[in-house]
Image (cartoon, grey):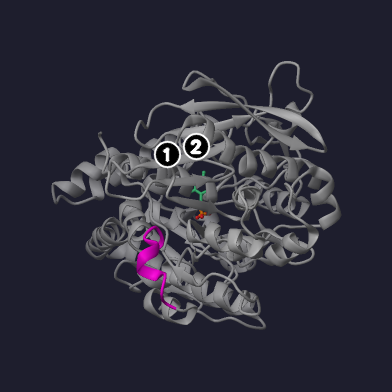
Amino acid sequence: MIYDRNQPRVAYFCMEYGLDEDLPIYAGGLGILAGDILKTAYDLRLPFIGVGIRWKEGYTTQLINEQGWPYDQPATYTKDILQDTGIIVHVTIRGDLVPVRVWRVDCFRNAPLYLLDTAVPGSNYDWATRRLYGGSSQDRIAQEIVLGIGGIRALEALGHKVDVYHFNEGHAVLAGIELIRRKKAAGKTFENALDATRRGVVFTTHTPVMAGNEEHEHELLRYMGAYDGLSWEEMRRIGDDPFNMTVAGLRLAHVANGVSKLHGMTARAMWSDKDDRAPIVSITNGVHIATWMHPSIHQAYKANLSLWAPHLQAKRELLEVIAKRTGVYLNSQSLLIGFARRAALYKRPDLIFKRMDIMGPLLESGRVQLVFSGKAHPQDESGKHLVSTIAKTAQDFPQSVVFLENYDMQLGRLLTAGCDVWLNNPQRPLEASGTSGIKAALNGCLNLSVLDGWWLEACQHGINGWQFGGGYEGPNQVKYDLASLYEVLLQEVIPTYYENPTKWRNMMQASANMAYHRFSSQRMLTEYYNIMYQPSRTANLVTEEIELMVGS
Ligand SMILES: *Cc1c(COP(=O)(O)O)cnc(C)c1O
């Protein structure tokens, strides 16, 4: 055996995996986290299995038209890292028996990833795994039946023994329904089956944005086949009415976590009125260092050398890509601020442009350069509007503002290694963790961020980056954050960059140190094993004790 047999065997369920830009089965942070966890389990030789979906079209490819409006095209990918296991399992959707093929991504041996696929010749259910997060509620539920119910059946057919089922986000909770159905079929009462299932399930919740916590009408769930043999009373007991996937996750697990200390607190408050739910602890996200640290920066860091020279190299690499893609030649001597993330309202990508009387002169003189990237969800019109606002601002300041189409892992790597500053201004407390800022910090790209998500735990203002807004939440938050952003930008960031290079370089070093030691995926996965995957440690404690133990 190449792996550590004393550790529990974990099956990790997730809708998306960000392993590589050439395997576009991810949309954003959730998938990147799942990909980083899988790679880390492989590095540490842990017995860990990923279960996901082989999306036929992948996630969307984003392009911007001449009017500055974003549009979507299906992504395509090469299949040669997928191996057909030869196994087909069946799930029932709308009363039809649907075949599901099981593929294996074969580069992680002890931590294989199995991808489920309904595009089987002769089946007319190929639509169920066509497009990640695409389609109607019916599509969503069909996808969730494939992942959850199909996933449990696939693991059984593959002969994998599992000690802990980890549901990453509510999308996976139908796996819990299938585990209960099996125990009921073997003679247990519903309550006993639920109890026994819980002992082997853990759950991670990912967003304080209410709309991000998916809900379905019971009628539709039953019609689609998601009840999987359970009754309305039983399903309602697990997920309420309408059926909330996050609440179900919290009731199907014996322990759950938020993805930063602040998010753990937010989630505990958010779900405090839900009876009989798992305690919610905090395990802050981390990133896979070998994936996200620029090789030259990594090398210099390990040799205890200054990060400045490799940073300039990474910056030039980024500027070349920008020039090639947009025709804009940015200046490698000038301050470059990056902002790349999913285009969602709460992330406020247009915040820095709210006062053009302040920003205009900085951009025209070239003292500040900005690079943006980010996709909106294909059905999110407000997100697309944000993208078009930024793309139009780039047209207004062609020498100093650029928008890069189709944010993906490759761009994520280039941007977080090549920018000088990483800007982050979500409406607190809605950013559960954020991981692009960790990637930036790791490469010595200095965070300029509100105190939300991971940054609240990491920030030493003026030492390893900067905060603005002071953690303020409430009315006039935009006004307040905005004033604070300009104050820190004008009085600290810009003067330090141009007038105090020694301090800048020391801050880069402090930033990389902090991220390397405290926000790696190795630290994160170790915490998952120590806290979440060892039921004996938490079995006899009540909710409040567990939340106190690892919450604050
Ligand atoms: C890291 C990463 C994300 C997640 O970053 P956030 O800061 O959480 O928004 C999303 N997309 C890509 C391509 C990434 O590399």
Q: Looking at the picture, does residue 223 appear above or below residue 424? A: above
Q: 140 or 427: nearer the eye?
A: 140
Q: Is residue 44 visible?
A: yes
Q: Looking at the picture, does residue 502 appear above or below residue 110? A: below
Amino acid type of the residue that numbered disc 2 sits on in the rendered structure: Ile
For the point 36% across and 60% down, the residue is 534
Circle 2: element type: helix
Query: Disc 1 designates what residue?
Result: 318
Percent across and percent down for residue 501 are 26, 60
Looking at the rendering, the stretch of residues picked out in magenta corresponds to 532-541
Circle 1 packing at 10 Å, graded few (<14), some (14-19), many (20+), is many
Q: Is residue 175 left or right of residue 418?
A: right
Q: 392 or 261: nearer the eye?
A: 261
Percent across and percent down for residue 441 are 35, 57
Q: Looking at the picture, does residue 125 appear above or below residue 449? A: above
Amino acid type of the residue that numbered disc 1 sits on in the rendered structure: Leu
* Residue 111 counted in the magenta span: no
Q: Is residue 116 left or right of residue 488?
A: right
